[in-house]
């Protein structure tokens, strides 16, 4: 119940205090026209956004993990840290471009400061944190932002693989001296250490333009 209430609060806050960006009239009209021609309901659109967000984040995760494992094999953990710093953002950037969406990972315990949540993402991330702290399972979520022109898909990222702990676990225990040295060199303000299996690491955040979602139906 509390959880639902929290999400309700988050949703209300987002709808009322979302970024007041100007939306072009053409885009609205295009979406409305497409919806009318196909007679789509709001529920069908949200449902499709959920399916699409889910498949995009799975694809993104597969790409990151495959390339990360390759980097670990070739260069060991410290070398793989350099690989992540150089490539994580661009891998997500080009995947996002190929789908006409924006894909990010955000966290309040961020390693890369550019992975801090935006104001519109913060209450959703806090709801996931609240759930994690209270042992409540979190489902993916869709919020309308930018006057409903964009659907924000989010999904928790949990430490579910012991490999993650080699770079996000306890220093001196799972995180080796060499890895720690590389991390402090590359990320002097790192907040992403000290995690355990099952911890919330952050969340996926995918901005799906509504007109792209409508095209899929
Ligand atoms: C080789 C070390 C390494 C391993 C193993 C690793 N990470 Fe990371 N992780 C990093 C680095 C480095 C960054 C920062 C990347 C950047 O600068 O964009 C990062 C960033 C992240 C972020 C983005 C938020 C932030 O803190 O900046 C998430 C989420 C994340 N990792 C989750 C995971 C998960 C889940 C696993 C296990 C499947 C994992 N990582 C395994 C090194 C690692």
Image: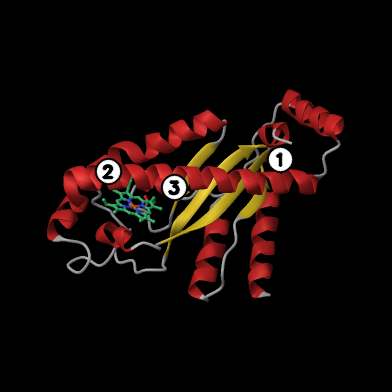
Q: Can you identify the residue that label 3 sits on?
A: 61
Q: Can you identify the residue that label 1 sits on?
A: 147
In what element is the residue under mark 1? helix
Residues under numbered marks 2 and 3 in contact, where contact means CB atoms less than 8 Å apart? no
What residue is shown at x 58% (from left), y 41% (from top)? Answer: 207
Bin the neighbour count of mark 2 within 10 Å (Cα to Cα): few under 14, some 14-19, many 20 and up.
few
Residues under numbered marks 1 and 2 in contact, where contact means CB atoms less than 8 Å apart? no
What residue is shown at x 19% (from left), y 43% (from top)? Answer: 74
**How far apart, in angstroms, are the residues tagged by discs 2 and 3?**
14 Å
Return the x and y of residue 172 as percentages of the image width and height: 17, 67
Q: Earlier in the sequence, mark 1 or mark 2?
A: 2
Camera sees residue 18: no
**How far apart, in angstroms, are the residues tagged by discs 1 and 3?**
29 Å
Using residue 87 as the reference point, say whether residue 214 is left or right of it.
Answer: right
- In front here: 33 or 147? 33
Bin the neighbour count of mark 3 within 10 Å (Cα to Cα): few under 14, some 14-19, many 20 and up.
some
Q: Which mark is residue 70?
A: 2
Using residue 22 as the reference point, say whether residue 71 is left or right of it.
Answer: left
Q: Earlier in the sequence, mark 2 or mark 3?
A: 3
**How far apart, in angstroms, are the residues tagged by discs 1 and 2?**
42 Å
């Amino acid at each position: 119940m509390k959880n639902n209430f929290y999400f309700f609060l988050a949703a209300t806050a987002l709808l009322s205090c979302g970024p007041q960006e100007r939306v072009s009239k053409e885009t609205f009209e295009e979406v409305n026209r497409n919806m009318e021609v196909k007679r789509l309901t709001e529920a069908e659109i949200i449902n499709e956004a959920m399916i699409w967000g889910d498949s995009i984040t799975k694809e993104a995760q597969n790409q990151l993990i495959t390339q990360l494992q390759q980097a670990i094999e070739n260069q060991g953990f410290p070398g793989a840290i350099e690989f992540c710093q150089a490539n994580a953002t661009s891998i997500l950037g080009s995947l996002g471009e190929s789908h006409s969406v924006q894909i990010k990972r955000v966290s309040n315990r961020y390693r890369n400061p550019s992975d801090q949540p935006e104001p519109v993402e913060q209450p959703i991330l806090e709801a996931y944190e609240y759930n994690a702290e209270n042992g409540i399972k979190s489902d993916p979520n869709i919020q309308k932002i930018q006057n409903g022109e964009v659907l924000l898909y989010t999904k928790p990222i949990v430490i579910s693989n012991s490999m993650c702990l080699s770079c996000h676990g306890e220093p001196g225990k799972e995180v080796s001296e060499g890895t720690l040295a590389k991390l402090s060199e590359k990320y002097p303000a790192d907040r992403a250490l000290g995690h355990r299996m099952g911890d919330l690491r952050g969340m996926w955040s995918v901005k799906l333009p509504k007109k792209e979602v409508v095209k899929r139906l």
